[in-house]
Image: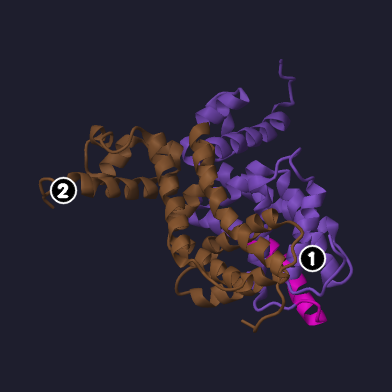
Chain colours: A purple, B brown
Amino acid sequence: MARKPGSRSEITGPRLREAALRLFARDGYAAVSMRQIAAEVGVQAGALYLYTADKQSLLADLMADHLEALLAAWAEEAPEGDARARLDHFARFHIRFHAARADAVFIAYMELRNLTPGNFARIEALRRRYETELEQILRDGQAEGCFALPDTKLAAMALIAMLTGVNTWFREGGRLSLPRVEDIYVDMVLKAAGATAGPPP
Amino acid sequence: MARKPGSRSEITGPRLREAALRLFARDGYAAVSMRQIAAEVGVQAGALYLYTADKQSLLADLMADHLEALLAAWAEEAPEGDARARLDHFARFHIRFHAARADAVFIAYMELRNLTPGNFARIEALRRRYETELEQILRDGQAEGCFALPDTKLAAMALIAMLTGVNTWFREGGRLSLPRVEDIYVDMVLKAAGATAGPPP
């Protein structure tokens, strides 16, 4: 397809990120070269450096983009009501957001070891901000007397691990629809938080 | 250190597996060559083929070893008592076993994508056997009337994901000891299963 004049930077930036995400997820960061990414996008390797300083920056930016999109999407949901309703909302939001971004989720976990210390700190701070969003709901629930948890920090990490785990096995068209999976997980999440019983899922 | 005659196969097999595990965990399967593994062990690349057919077999064997060791260790524990006691035991066992094998756990999740279909089926069957051990406890608990779960299969996967998540953040010498972490997770796991309240952790 012919490239329209002037549209290059708009097209190549996102295409570069998509290609890098796909290749990193498939082969792993260490095994993928900038040359391969360039070939996937259909440009010379040198052209990539118009969009990113190096492969390390590209990885860190992919992870940061994912986490910033997650935080922005959650900020938009801004659920109201008691902690029980907010936790229900969080669990469904988390499952839906992550199920739609399998490669980004996989890389966010798998490639942490390949970040420089500075980039690791940047990504870790974003991840921690998201955890704190859940922890705040759990703390509010404790204060409202509707949750019973021995440690809200550990609980936030435990519940996020449980919810993200859906990505390892869920496939569209399987035994259960995603909304049904959400119902089942919300039941377990609320119970794990010691929430007083609600309606059966 | 001089190699004793006759001890080569006993020494190099385990050392090969340790080196491969460490390198795969650090750089990813796709980025590691048999030559690098040989260099790490201190032998010629050709010598590796006395112990493994190829890199793919090595990866599959590492994963299978890990899961078989897990199943054997759990079979040895063979907890008795009601489902509540067995679930408590399972949660502590899972956390302890996995915390001691960070590289193997990381690879077991991360490198599934690099298995051939035949090897994937072999590893998946082992993983499924372990899940079924937990699912049986959950089913027994339902039958005994002490658990309340909408779906025992999903619950087994959800609880294993939650428990394995400890590996992503736990460090010896941190805020909490591993036994204390076990207490806190057991509390959440039992509650998530809908267990009737026990003593506070």
Q: Secondary structure at mark 1?
A: helix
Q: Is residue A190 left or right of residue A53?
A: right
Residue B65 shown left or right of residue A13 in the figure:
left
Q: Is residue B30 above or below residue A124?
A: above
Measure the alpha-carbon separation of dots 1 and 2. Answer: 59 Å
Of A47 and A117, nearer the camera is: A117
Q: Could you tell me which residue is drawn at 71 percent across and 68 percent down?
A: B147
Circle nearer the viewer, 1 or 2: 2
Q: Main secondary structure of the magenta part?
A: helix
To which residue does mark 1 refer? A87
Q: Residue at x 81, y 63 (%)?
A: A88
The residue lying at 74 percent from left, 72 percent from top is: A138
Q: Which residue is mark 2?
A: B7
Visible residue check, residue B171? yes
Which mark, residue A78? none
Do circles 1 and 2 both sit on a common chain?
no
Residue A133: image location, x then y, percent: 73, 66
Q: Is residue A21 magenta?
A: no
Magenta span includes A140: yes
